[in-house]
């Protein structure tokens, strides 16, 4: 059984999408990051970076003690290796997927996250910062659109690279983007949106968190974090 430490954000959705697609049983342990639950000592033992998602696998394939993992890319790779799904076994196919997974983890996620921050949440509207991240989002959308011009999915068959990228495209309007400008990306987006496992994953999110609005309390907790005091 897998415990998923989760909140209803793009990095959280990646993992519910995988678990729904692979049809493996899991228990959601909600970590409400807007209330500061990511700083609880028990969670920090699993996820020392105080970020969701994280998992604990109580039945690892080596038969040993439970394994805990943080960082959504590492979790996707772990689950793919455990189940033998959504990551090819051959070296070429595998690294086709891995390079796009790392592209998402190092580029698409962080840059679009900064876009959200400066476009939606920052107390001051800083035109330079908004423009920088909206343009970078547009550039990254263009890279993905070109990649999808002659293939159905990001890397071979539907894989963990698609599951990592999709949740970050969902808020495209908030990122100042119009999918009509990226027709291949739009076709890919619609095909993933229509998958029943993806719909299940988002339905779970709606059950767990009815309000996606960012409160002032949440902003105070999430933004401007400095070094944590060690106990
Ligand atoms: N690189 C990390 C990023 C995780 C991340 O930024 N999680 C956010 C929600 S999407 C979070 O938990 N934030 C809590 C906080 O900032 O304290 C991953 O992909 O797992």
Image (cartoon, grey):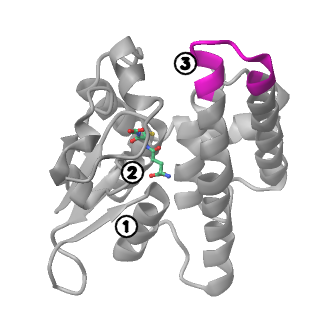
Mark 3 vs mark 2: give the one in front.
3
Q: Is residue 120 magenta?
A: yes
Say which element carries label 3. Answer: helix
| Nearer to us in this view, 65 or 188 | 65
Precedes in sequence: disc 2 or disc 1: 2
Percent position of residue 180, x then y: 80, 24
User: Which residue is depicted at the point 57% across and 42% down?
Assistant: 166
Q: Residues within 10 Å of mark 2 (few under 14, many from 20)?
A: many
User: Which residue is depicted at the point 22% across and 62% down?
Assistant: 56
Say which element carries label 1. Answer: helix
Compared across the picture, whether 144 is left or right of 53 comes to right
Q: What number is the disc on residue 79? A: 1
Percent position of residue 71, x then y: 43, 58
- Up-down: is 208 above or below 198? above
Percent position of residue 73, x then y: 49, 60
| Nearer to us in this view, 180 or 211 | 211
Alpha carbon separation for disc pair 3 and 2 = 25 Å
Decide: marks 2, 1 in contact (CB < 8 A)? yes
User: Which residue is depicted at the point 81% across and 23% down?
Assistant: 128
Precedes in sequence: disc 3 or disc 1: 1
Q: Main secondary structure of the magenta part?
A: helix
- Ligand 1 picture quarter: top left
Q: Which residues are magenta?
A: 116-130
- Up-down: is 163 above or below 210? below
User: Which residue is depicted at the point 54% across and 51% down?
Assistant: 164
Q: Which residue is mark 2?
A: 15
Q: Residues within 10 Å of mark 1 (few under 14, many from 20)?
A: many
Q: Is residue 190 visible?
A: no
Q: Which residue is mark 3?
A: 121
Decide: marks 3, 1 in contact (CB < 8 A)? no
Q: Is residue 83 magenta?
A: no
């Amino acid at each position: 059984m897998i415990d998923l430490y989760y909140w209803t954000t793009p990095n959280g959705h990646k993992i519910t999408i995988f678990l729904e697609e692979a049809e493996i049983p899991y228990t959601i342990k909600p970590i409400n990051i807007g209330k500061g639950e990511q700083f609880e000592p028990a969670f920090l033992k699993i996820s020392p970076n105080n970020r969701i998602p994280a998992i604990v696998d109580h039945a690892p394939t080596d038969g040993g003690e439970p394994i805990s993992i943080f960082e959504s890319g590492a979790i996707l790779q772990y689950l793919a290796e455990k189940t033998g799904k959504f990551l090819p076994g051959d070296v070429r196919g595998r690294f086709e997927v891995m390079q796009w997974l790392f592209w998402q983890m190092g580029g698409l996620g962080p840059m679009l996250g900064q876009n959200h921050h400066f476009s939606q949440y920052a107390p001051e509207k800083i035109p330079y910062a908004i423009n920088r991240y909206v343009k970078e989002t547009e550039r990254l959308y263009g890279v993905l659109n070109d990649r999808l011009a002659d293939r159905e999915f990001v890397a071979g068959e539907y894989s963990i690279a698609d599951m990592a990228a999709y949740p970050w495209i969902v808020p495209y309007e908030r990122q100042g983007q119009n999918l009509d400008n990226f027709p291949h990306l739009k076709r890919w987006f619609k095909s993933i949106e229509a998958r029943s496992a993806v719909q299940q994953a988002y339905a779970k999110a709606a059950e767990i968190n009815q309000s996606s609005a960012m409160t002032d309390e949440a902003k105070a907790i999430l933004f401007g974090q400095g070094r944590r005091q060690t106990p």
